[in-house]
Amino acid sequence: MDYLKPVILPGGTILPGNLFLAPTAGYSDGPFRSICRTWGADLCYTEMVSTEALWRGNSKTHNLLKREDNEPEYAIQLFGSDYDSVYKSLPYLTQHNPLLLDINAGCPVPKIIKSGAGSWLMKDPRKLMDIIKTIKDHTDIPLTIKLRLGWDANSINYLKIAQEAQELGIQAVGLHARTKEMAYRGKADWNHIKHLKENLDIPVFGSGDLFTSEDVIRMLTQTKCDGVLIARGAFGNPFIFSQIKGTIDKLNAKTIIDTALKHLDLSIQYYGDQAFKEIRKHFSAYLKGIPNSNDLRRKLMTAQTKDQYKHLLNSIL
Ligand SMILES: Cc1cc2nc3c(=O)[nH]c(=O)nc-3n(C[C@H](O)[C@H](O)[C@H](O)COP(=O)(O)O)c2cc1C
């Protein structure tokens, strides 16, 4: 298992391991990060947070930065479209003392692109470099960027951008090995992760199609990337981190249900009544790991109280 190791960033910051929960809007909130830490994630990224919304004082955005009790460290991902909004948001980001700050330069969602953020920054690398310089000039917190391959198959530019960003002092690059045009379709091409690793001096984190522990081990060994950003593979299966580390035996329905209920408890603490809505997508994902649970999944979509959730889930056992 020599592929599992801490990551040392230029400047000396040590990430406690190399299995990360990727930034995932709508998923990597406090409760899910806490669950993933329990099951062996070495570091979890927040959902992307808008720099504009932060400095304007949007309370929902500020809440996204709340850290959980079992998160001695976490990574904050930000998205912004200009250095001014990023600059104004910095005091709010740094007060949480994240282990690293990550710039989202890969989000393909039209609303984000229209605002000039996310993968738009790969079309306009000057703007991305301005944002990097602004952050580097005003904080010592390690800075990383998360890229896609490029805008489309005809404009693959991740290596050029990563090398330029390295010159500006960023400390690692995450690469989701799809283009913006691919969104989440098609197969991620891990050859590009390998190529990036061979051509950069700073650590590289791979992303794309990490659905099982075998996928993760394959990516680490084939591409020699320094760490992995696990996204959809952790939805409903936070156990993937323990599976990679070999610290869990065969998964059974009781473990899945107990974890889902713990997730619900954390979500109630975090969201109050809103938790019952927030948790549905997670429960639907958890139940994929349990055979013949389609009927139950339908019923869970209408559950309104903790007791109803508990009763329905325990009916499986
Ligand atoms: C629901 C969802 C939300 C996502 N949100 C973010 C995000 O906020 N920031 C980001 O950099 N990537 C985001 N991603 C991309 C993931 O971090 C990851 O790069 C991508 O899903 C590829 O990994 P996978 O194929 O293993 O899922 C999101 C992906 C999904 C499916």
Image: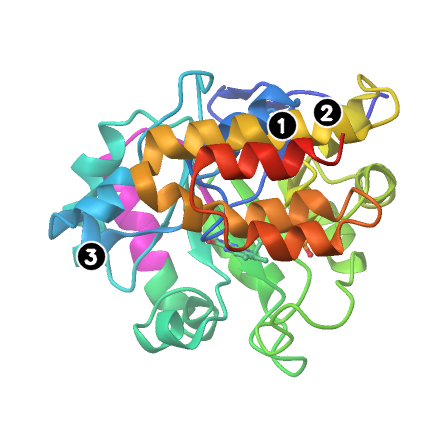
**Which numbered tag is attached to residue 292?**
none
Q: What residue type is labelled 1?
A: Thr
- Determine the residue positioned at 17% across, 36% down: 91
Q: In this view, does 123 lie to the left or right of 139?
A: right
Residue at mark 3 to residue at mark 2: CA–CA distance = 40 Å
Picture residue at 65% right of the left edge, 23% below the top: 39
Q: Name the residue under label 1.
A: 259
> Can you give x and y, in whole percent of width and height, for residue 193 in the image?
73, 53
Q: Can residue 202 be seen in this view?
A: no
- In the image, residue 150 sits, relative to residue 284, either above or below, namely below
Residue at the image position 69 percent from the left and 60 percent from the top: 177
Estimate the spatial distance between the alpha carbons at disc 3 and disc 1, rounded to whole Å.
35 Å
Which one is nearer the viewer's eye here, 194 or 53? 53
Give the position of the N terminus as an image quadrant: top right
Label located before the other in sequence (3 or 2): 3
Res. 255 mark: 2
Task: Report if the CB atoms under discs 3 and 2 are less than 8 Å apart.
Answer: no
Q: Indicate yes or no whether the magenta region holds residue 78.
A: no
Is 67 displayed left or right of 17 in the figure? left
Q: Mark 3 points at which residue?
A: 52
